[in-house]
Amino acid sequence: MATSPAERAVENRNAAIASRSLAGVCLIGPLGMKRGRGMQQEYSTTGARKQEASRLRGWFTYGRTGSPPQWGSLHFGHWGNPGAEVFGKGKRVLLEFVSANPTGPLHVGHGRGAAYGATVSNLLRAIGFEVDNEYYVNDAGRQMDILATSVYLRFCDVSVFPDNGYKGDYIADIAKQISNVEKHDIAQGVCKDEKDGGDKEKHIDALIANCKQVLGSDYQKIFKLAIDSILSGIKADLSDFGINYQQWFSEQSLVDSGLSEKTVKALQVSGHIYEKDGALWFKTTDFGD
């Protein structure tokens, strides 16, 4: 343990390097222990390291060498304690990662988070923890309403699309699946959009309100179609990437159960929530943030 300011500075620097080196860890994360050995050997540069890599059981570091320091080779090692496999025995871990909003396909940035999360999951399991991977599905709130309204507007084949709508080709693809729903002009009486000198936030909110009012129960049909379609693609992509989740948890289920509202009220009573700019904020500064 560091005892002097100089030693602590070195430790902090090493910790920073270690955190950045997780990009190297991500290379083998989704492959798991079963398929990782080939990848691990591929990233070794000498015969000795290849032999060491073939015996990999628990950890490796990603070092920097030279002056100035350059990213170097992977250095493999072993758990020092033969009992490492039971370190987490009897303990459960809920690991939530990726959890991208189901408003569009995954992109490469989500892939990085997926690799990172899968790596952590694999390593925890390797030392005995029972790990449940969770994808928190953000299927409630304004962004989902923007999604549903965007799909409906594509279905109606409008000539002018809102600035704040979702414009990807996938929106049109989902719209093609809509059937037995009437087309309406939901832009009537709506304030100007940003491109016309108005407010894009107020414009899209007015479109959402009109869409819900005009469509009635058909709005939920489009809402569900949009989410199910996008979520299906997300699940397929993550599965192809070698990542499996034990639970896909719906945010909407929290709202429907009343637990979300109950929790917010409890935090308000305890003084951990404040209101600013028309929204409620969690006072993280109370906890050292």
Image (tube, helix red, strand yellow):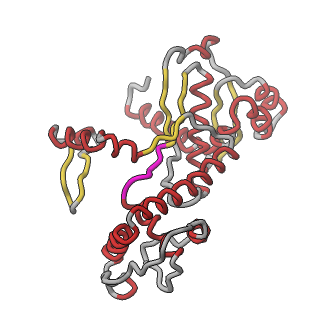
Residue 63 visible to an observer of this rendering: no
Between 215 and 122, which is closer to the camera in this rendering?
A: 215
Q: How many marks?
A: 0
Q: Position of residue 176 (x, y in %)?
A: 60, 70
Between 120 and 212, which is closer to the camera in this rendering?
A: 212
- Residue 46: within the magenta? no
Q: Residue at x 61, y 50 (%)?
A: 111
Where residue 187 sits, quadrant-wise, is bottom left
Q: Residue at x 55, y 21 (%)?
A: 129
State which quarter of the image contains the C terminus: top left
Which residue, as the protein is rendered here, is positioned at the far front?
180
Which residue, as the protein is rendered here, is positioned at the far right?
47
Between 264 and 12, which is closer to the camera in this rendering?
A: 264
Classify residue 109 as left or right of residue 13.
right
Q: Is 70 placed above or below 225 here?
A: above
State which quarter of the image contains the N terminus: top left
Residue 13 visible to an observer of this rendering: yes
Which residue, as the protein is rendered here, is positioned at the far top?
83
Which residue, as the protein is rendered here, is positioned at the far bottom?
196
Please identify the dominant SS of the magenta region: loop
Classify residue 271 as left or right of residue 112.
left
Classify residue 135 as left or right of residue 56.
left
Q: Position of residue 248 (x, y in %)?
A: 51, 41
Where residue 47 sits, quadrant-wise, is top right
State which region is magenta.
Answer: 136-141
Where residue 104 sits, quadrant-wise, is bottom right
- Residue 137: within the magenta? yes
Q: Residue at x 62, y 38 (%)?
A: 244
Q: Position of residue 181 (x, y in %)?
A: 50, 70
Q: Position of residue 92 (x, y in %)?
A: 49, 22
Q: Is 261 placed above or below 233 here?
A: above
Q: Is 32 placed above or below 129 here?
A: below
